[in-house]
Amino acid sequence: MSIPQPDRVIIFDTTLRDGEQSPGATLNAEEKLAIAHQLALLGVDVIEAGFAASSPGDFAAVRTIAEQVGTLDGPIICSLARAVRQDIQTAAEALQPAAHSRIHVFISASDIHLQYQLRKSRAEVLAIVEEMVAYAKSFVEDVEFSPMDATRAEPAYLYQMLETAIRAGATTINIPDTVGYRTPKEMERLIQGIRTRVAGIDQVVLSVHTQNDLGLATANALAAIEHGVRQIECTINGIGERAGNTALEEIVMALEVRKSYFNPFLGRPSESDAPLTRIKTTEIYKTSRLVSHLTGMLVQPNKAIVGANAFAHESGIHQDGVLKHRETYEIMEAASIGLAENQIVLGKHSGRNAFRTRLQELGFELNEADLNKAFHRFKEIADKKKEVSDWDLEAIVRDELQVQIESGFQLEHVQVTCGDCTCPTATVTILKPDGTILTDAAVGTGPVDAVYRAIHRLVQIPNQLVEFSVQAVTEGIDALGTVTVRLRQDSRLFSGQASDTDIVVAAAHAYMTALNRVHRHIQNQPERPAPTGILF
């Protein structure tokens, strides 16, 4: 019997699973939980909290999110699992506290994957699909099935695999464009073929997961929606494996801005004003910034929707048009994604209440202890620059919250001497986890190099610096600068980010954040190796 298809698009967020597979975007359990809470506020329908079987850390993160975010009125909490009994059992155990849980089972579908990765025949894989989807169904009612590399699979075999999964109990069928190979027209034909040739397809929710290798992820996902897909797998800021995934903010705002166009595809009158998703769009910008900060992955200025230039106009013609009537060159309002058009400025004479009120307006709800720490930092910054904007406030709060998340070595003091006739020298004091205070000095090719050499001599954590970038938070000579650092250790990348009016100080704190993540990784070894072949 057919089940009613949703008249809206289900948003399946995989930032904490596929997004975290971005090189250097590794998140700890506390950071994952913070993002999960924000995703729930954003209004996503499904949070893929991780791959529970990949490591004890990922298992703990999925279980914590299931406990604290997977409430009765909260989103569905999902864990990825290979078509392997142990993976599925581990996922079920991690998801047990959630009020609404989903196990996401995947296995390869294309001949190239079957031959070179799985080394199994088509018949063998079909048998695995039937057995493992049924096994997942024995734990939870909500089972999603993904045939990895579906868009390069032979269509007749793909149809057969999907029918097998549906008979075994799958409730959502997801079609991954694992390597970002297809174009929108090809995606349309694939979805049409599935809808007309797969028995039982009207009994499940049809989904797509599109990668961005050719820059077509969002276009492919929107094309799929036009032909009956009702779930989109996406990530905040489009982060993910290789070139990333469909960006949640792009899908949601495309559906919002072009509502009259997409309404008929979802069985609505074109003039209907009802939202096409459950996303609270005013939470988009805050969510984007949180993910960027915690992953250390900066959002490019020209990124659609959430980039710094998305609502900026430099051309005289554009400026003139916008001043006369905003819609001449803007198809959406900055306020619709939670971005304040007029930046409120606080200064050194501003009080705690004004500070608290402005943070609340920006979406930050801090407890008294956190507020005190952030207010103290605000006063320090306000003494260095005349005006502290919303952008500065956001950077201040993010830094203070990160300090709580990151435990380990703490930077107590940094002092640098440099100049064109002076050898750059840095003196650094560090508080070790055991309470010991250490001080050392080092020389380098520049002030940052000197600081990093001194820190390295104190902490003695093996690593390789692979990226160092600086970005101004606001304009002006007294702007806060945000430094992002990436370190490589054991073939993995670890990021750190910090802001300060002094770039050298920001660089030191960013380096310490990344080093603490490396340190925690080393302490947690040995862990079970992450399963291979997780691409979509």
Image: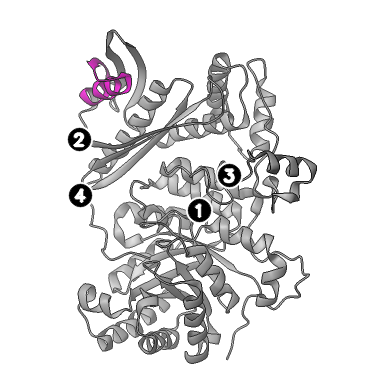
| Residue 340 picture quarter | top right
For residue 22, above or below residue 150: above
Q: Residue at x 42, y 44 (%)?
A: 297
Q: Which mark is nearer the camera, 4 or 1?
A: 1
Give how far apart the Cα atoms at labels 3 and 1 are. Answer: 11 Å
Would you say residue 199 is visible in this rendering? no
Q: Amino acid at mark 4?
A: Pro
Q: Which residue is mark 1?
A: 236
- Figure quadrant of the C terminus: bottom left
- Which is more N-terminal, label 2 or label 3? 3
Residues tagged 3 and 1 counted as in contact (Cβ below 8 A): no
Q: Which mark is residue 376?
A: none
Q: Amino acid at mark 1?
A: Ile
Give how far apart the Cα atoms at labels 4 and 3 are. Answer: 36 Å
Would you say residue 156 is visible in this rendering? yes
For residue 246, above or below residue 327: below
- Which is more N-terminal, label 1 or label 4? 1
Q: Residue at x 38, y 47 (%)?
A: 27
Q: Which mark is nearer the camera, 4 or 2?
A: 2
Pinpoint residue 493: horizontal percent, then vertical percent. 29, 44
- Tell me if mark 4 has few (under 14), some (14-19) or many (20+) residues whose alpha carbon lies within 10 angstroms of its own: few
Q: Amino acid at mark 2?
A: Pro
- Tell me if mark 3 has few (under 14), some (14-19) or many (20+) residues whose alpha carbon lies within 10 angstroms of its own: many
Give how far apart the Cα atoms at labels 4 and 1 are. Answer: 31 Å
Q: Which mark is nearer the camera, 1 or 2?
A: 1
Q: Which residue is mark 3?
A: 286
